[in-house]
Image (cartoon, rainbow, N blue to C red):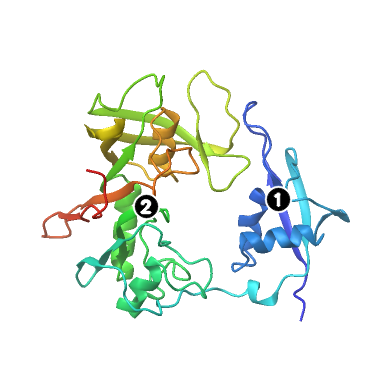
Amino acid sequence: MIAPTLLIELKIAPGPKDSGETRLDILLLPRVREQAPRLSRAGLKELFRAGAIRLEGRALAASERLGPGTYRIAVTDFPPEALTSAAARPAQQGPFLPMVFEDDRLLVLDKRSGVASVPHSPDETETAVGAALAHHPALAGIGRGGLEPGLLHRLDTGTSGLLAFAKTEEEFARLRRIWSQGEVIKTYRAIVSPKAGSPSSPLRAPQELHLQLAHDPDSAKRMVALLPGRKIRHRGKPLESFTRIVEAHALAGGSLDLEIQIRTGVMHQIRCTLAALGWPIEGDQIYRGAQAPRLWLHAWRLGLPAKEKGAPLELEAPLPENWPR
């Protein structure tokens, strides 16, 4: 059975003069997923390779760049299963991640580095979402449901530490609201290697870092920092980010152990900010950090405002045993 052709109306607005144009596959994937939620990035690339994505009868390439305008793009030969809603499943090995906190409204676990927060498909079960569902199956359907039931935020696969899930719709709505308003205190630890010639040093803690971040026009997996006085290609609207270096401790070999707080939650905020200033996190292959056995970034502490007639909640995930000392 072959799925019917999907018609996607893609509108590309003029951007800043220095933003450049963006690859078509990056622009098209979120629009296609509105109708085919289970289509993976690899699946979309396969459709491009098969000539199944066409504009006015012409097959388009994944790397093609379209200028500002409105385009009606036809996408054919969808696998039928891509058109159905996806739902995460419990981990086959059970609740394999440590639980840091649980009450009747909230579940917080300690994610290991190398474990994805969210599955890409229902077949991928050994994720943080899978571990949470294995512990509390009633999470299914909470919040956004689907592949991220009850999930209040994400951690990159290489990042370890605290990951929070709401167990009720009311708590999901409450915490999402205060998260968006910057009322949640998120504290991280990161091991960095400052590059020679960096204009400043993280040792001048405490210090506030206010940068505009935007998506890389050539990669959905990378952000760019829009530094003053530099023309940097990007896509989408720049996002304000607020990052604070609280403390910095020198380690052997010239590395630094940073304590960092963030008030905003832009994708790769800490990783991109530190790399842009010449202090990339060790083990960060995307932002050219020094080689390390893992990405040395840990979601260390989480401070949540009080519920009605309650006290603020302060949580901590211990540093991994192999954390550089």
Number of numbered tags placed on the structure image: 2
* Residue at 56% over, 73% down: 85
- Identify the amino acid type marked 1: Leu
| Residue at numbered disc 1 | 10
* Residue at 21% over, 73% down: 104
- Percent x, y for residue 90? 40, 78
* Residue at 30% over, 49% down: 298
Secondary structure type for disc 1: strand
In the visual, does 153 lie left or right of 47? left
- Percent x, y for residue 127? 41, 68
Q: Residues within 10 Å of mark 2 (few under 14, many from 20)?
A: many
* Residue at 27% over, 40% down: 261
In the visual, does 133 lie left or right of 125? left
Q: Is residue 183 above or below residue 229?
A: below
Looking at the image, do the residues carrying marks 2 and 1 touch, with CB atoms under 8 Å apart? no
- Percent x, y for residue 294? 39, 50
Q: Nearer the viewer, residue 31 or 298?
A: 298
| Corner quadrant of residue 21 | top right
**Distance CA(mark 2)–CA(mark 1):** 34 Å
Residue extending farthest front: 253
In the rendered image, the quadrant that contains the C terminus is top left
- Percent x, y for residue 182? 30, 44
In the rendered image, the quadrant that contains the N terminus is bottom right
In the visual, does 205 lie left or right of 236? left
| Residue at numbered disc 2 | 159
Q: Nearer the viewer, residue 35 or 38?
A: 38
Q: Residues within 10 Å of mark 1 (few under 14, many from 20)?
A: some
Secondary structure type for disc 2: loop
Q: Nearer the viewer, residue 202 or 32?
A: 202
Residue extending farthest right: 57
Q: Earlier in the sequence, mark 2 or mark 1?
A: 1
Q: Is residue 316 above or below residue 95?
A: above
